[in-house]
């Protein structure tokens, strides 16, 4: 059994021979680990998944999935992985036939196929739409089918490319809990998402990818501690106080902050020197006749860490 179920080293990929979509990508995941790959649009997340699932080639570097070389053992990799991509598939068939087709493709026996289909349809709330064709479903319903269908077969590694897009909060939580249960039983998961709250909740480790390489990596707690001097100060000002972001920036011109936003009479300041600046902030507001209704101070979130990392 491989120690690392996904192992990527110095992977480089260019589509046009000029710009590299991946430029030295390096990371690994262990058995039963949920690894979150986070990044801006165009950072290299989807390209990484397509290479690791052997859908496209790469220019240099090396990698393995479940102990198999991604350049030399594509057929072996495809037999032991699952993939949920952003693109839809099988939209010509009914929901029920989507599950049956998946079972047939993975050579799951009829009895086992029917049993799994029944269990997954119940778990993912698909019974009422099982006879509908995929192209008649809403975006959230299609996503539920995509995720559920992939669990019609056993696998060692699953790649989930934004699997909760379009889902309501209840179904999102149900799917994330199901993925966690599978990981606890040994399934290795590579998970991409734009929802950093769910990454915070489910991922054992997180790699932040930017310009085709991992620029920060660690558990959510480690990343927050690494940027632990950041604090978010939220100030609600009176309705009689109408100021633009530019106005507030002028008011706070002598105060150090990393980020400032003003929306609907709410001022949000992210700063690494809150203790030093809080008194100055409050006195500055008072001196400019800006009425403060209440304030709130929060420790850094994963969103704060992400913003800070990708804007370095």
Image: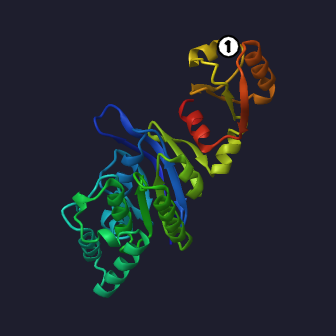
Instruction: Give coordinates of residue 112: x percent, y percent.
Output: 35, 84
Q: Is residue 137 visible?
A: yes
Question: Helix, strand, or loop for circle 1?
Answer: helix
- Residue appearing at x 39%, y 38% in the figure: 42
Q: Is residue 170 above or below residue 289?
A: below
Left or right: 114, with 270 as reference point: left
**Quick check: 183 above or below 311?**
below
- Count of numbered badges drawn on the protein: 1
Is residue 1 shown above or below 169? below
In terms of image quadrants, where is residue 231? top right
Residue 97 in picture, x, y percent from top left: 23, 72
**Residue at the outermost bottom position:** 111
Farthest residue, direction front: 240
Q: Residue at x 73, y 36 (%)?
A: 297
Residue beneath label 1, please? 251
Left or right of 162 on screen, residue 304? right
Question: Dot 1: within a 10 Å radius of its alpha carbon, few (fewer than 14), some, or many (20 or more) residues?
Answer: some
Q: Nearer the viewer, residue 227 or 58?
A: 227
Colouring rule applied to residues: rainbow
Residue drawn at 72 percent across, 29 percent down:
293
Place of residue 79 in the rendered image (x, y in percent of width and height, measured from the top left): 34, 70
Question: Residue at position x 46%, y 42% from top?
Answer: 24
Residue 305 versus residue 269: which sits nearer the camera? 269
Q: In this rendering, would 146 be left or right of 305?
A: left
Residue 2 seen by the camera = no
Which quadrant of the figure contains the C terminus? top right
Q: Position of residue 300 (x, y in %)?
A: 67, 40
């Amino acid at each position: 059994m491989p120690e690392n179920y996904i192992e990527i080293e110095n992977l480089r990929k260019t589509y046009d021979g000029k710009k590299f979509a991946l430029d030295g990508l390096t990371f690994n995941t262990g058995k039963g680990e949920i690894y979150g790959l986070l990044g801006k649009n165009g950072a290299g997340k989807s390209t990484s998944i397509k290479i690791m699932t052997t859908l496209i080639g790469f220019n240099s570097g090396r990698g393995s999935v479940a102990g198999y070389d991604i350049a030399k053992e594509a057929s072996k990799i495809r037999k032991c992985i699952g993939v949920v991509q952003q693109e839809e598939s099988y939209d010509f068939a009914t929901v029920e036939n989507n599950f049956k087709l998946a079972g047939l493709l993975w050579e799951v026996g009829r009895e086992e196929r029917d049993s799994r289909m029944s269990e997954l349809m119940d778990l993912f709330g698909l019974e009422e739409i099982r006879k509908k064709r995929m192209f008649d479903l809403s975006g959230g319903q299609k996503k539920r089918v995509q995720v559920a269908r992939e669990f019609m077969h056993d696998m060692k590694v699953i790649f989930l490319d934004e699997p909760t897009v379009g889902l309501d909060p209840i179904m999102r939580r149900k799917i994330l809990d199901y993925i966690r249960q599978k990981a606890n039983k040994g399934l290795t998961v590579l998970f991409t998402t734009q929802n950093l709250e769910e990454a915070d909740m489910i991922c054992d480790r997180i790699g932040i990818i930017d310009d085709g390489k991992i620029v920060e990596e660690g558990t959510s707690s480690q990343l927050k501690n690494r940027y632990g001097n950041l604090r978010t100060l939220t100030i609600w000002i009176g309705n009689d106080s109408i100021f633009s972001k530019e106005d507030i920036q002028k008011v706070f011109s002598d105060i150090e902050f990393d980020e400032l936003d003003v929306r609907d009479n709410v001022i949000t300041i992210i700063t690494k020197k809150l203790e030093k600046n809080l008194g100055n902030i409050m006195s500055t507001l008072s001196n400019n006749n800006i009425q403060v209704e209440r304030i709130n101070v929060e420790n850094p979130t994963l969103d704060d860490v992400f913003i800070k990392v990708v804007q370095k």
